Image: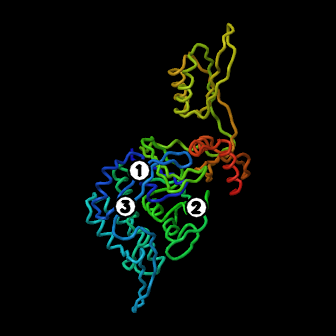
Amino acid sequence: MSRVMYIEAMSGAAGDMLLGALIDAGLPQDEIRRSLATLGVPHELHVSRVLRAGVSATHVRVVDLSTAPAAPAHTHAHTDADGRTHVHTHAHGDEVQRSLSDIRRIIGQSGIPPRVRTRAIELFERLGEVEASIHGVAVDEIHFHEVGATDSIVDIVGCALGLDWFGIEDIVSSPLNVGAGTVEIAHGTFPVPAPATIRLLQGAPVFSAGPRVELTTPTGALLISGCARSYGPMPAMTIGRVGYGAGTRDFPGIPNVLRIVIGDRTAPLPPERPAQDEHAVLQIECEIDDMNPQLFGPAVDGLFGAGALDVFMTPVQMKKGRPGTLLTVLADPDHRAAMTEVLFTQTTTLGVRIQRVERETLARRWEEVPVAGGMVRIKVAERDGRVLNAAPEFDDCERVAAATGRPIKDVQIEAMTRWRQGS
């Protein structure tokens, strides 16, 4: 089994949010501080517990201890006599000129493990290529501004250290909420997502929901797009650790958090049966009147685990006036032995009746829609290309409701509204 991490970016992503989620999941603070100190970049790592719309999460803030003023940087470009364009960053008069070679040196001379150094440098090299393409200059001429600042270097290297500490072999991410509105960057006012962010997210699924602010930053886009191998719903896995990383703002009703789930991959459930008008199945039944009712639950779970298509119970009146339960199982013919094995070992029945029945089914498929607080799958049933039924997956709605404090029915209504708008 491989170690996998699932990232839920329902409220976007930023470097400090991912680092906070890794610390929240159990990344030792003392160990991460010692490793980051070897970068030689003067800083302090402030870690605190906060609430975001009622959800407890870990917030990380990096304080730059260098002599440069702790004020927002601004960037300008100029063209020299040879026609080459140079991009520079200033912070109230003190020029900050971290080129790609500067960052390679900072990370390369640090005391962090070689594999972590390699991953962090590769991330900055990817960012350099993106910045160079945006500004129309060579990579070696780029001087990073926001993402080259101390806090971003610490966030990116810290996240690389965290992934290595947990032994993450695979990363899957949900679609990213990029936010909306506009954002002020070095070159002026731009629509969200900013130029670097949208370039980094090419090929990744994104959506816009919630407050009209930037929710996915360039650093967050760099980390997720540079590390995730795939995007979509949570993979089949055994959950080991869960962590919540907090964003800086607190939005009412929408937890501004990034959640990670770390565990071991498991074999995925078999895909739902493809559409077919007619299909022969076995109907296996038995009446039970002498079993502890608490044992029905494990028996039903065992039947589904063995491949049952459906299991249901009906109250019946048995001989001598005793109340009993009719246990009915629907299964493929090739699962007959598995079904009877569960019934005979996990219930008190002495015999079962089996008959072959025909059934008609609608074609079924999943679609996923964003709601405030996460993603919800919609099960769509159709026939001959006509959609006849659609319903939100209850487990997804329940998860979003628990994370946001909203009523489940409100999440269901929003999910169906979103689906209808996009269908």
Label 3, on which residue?
Answer: 154
Q: Secondary structure at mark 1?
A: helix
Give the residue type at disc 3.
Val
Name the residue furthest bottom.
81
Q: CA distance from mark 2 to mark 3?
A: 24 Å
**Image height of 218 relative to 349, above or below:** below
The answer to whether 374 appears left or right of 18 in the picture is right
Across and down, in percent, residue 80 comes to 40, 89
Q: Quadrant where the N terminus lies? A: top left
Residue under the point 60% across and 43% down: 405
Quarter of the rendering containing residue 334: top right
Q: Which residue is mark 2?
A: 179
Crowd rating for badge 2 (residues with CA inside 10 Å; few <14, some 14–19, many 20+): many
**Residue 338: image tag:** none
Q: Nearer the viewer, residue 377 or 365?
A: 377
Seen at 72% across and 50% down, the residue is: 387
State the residue position of label 1: 22
Q: Disc 2 on helix, strand or loop?
A: loop
Q: Amino acid at mark 1?
A: Leu
- Give coordinates of residue 378: x percent, y percent: 64, 48
- Height in image: 412 above or below 98? above
| Mark 3 residue crowding within 10 angstroms, few (<14) / some (14–19) / many (20+) | many
Residue closest to the eye, 187 or 141: 187
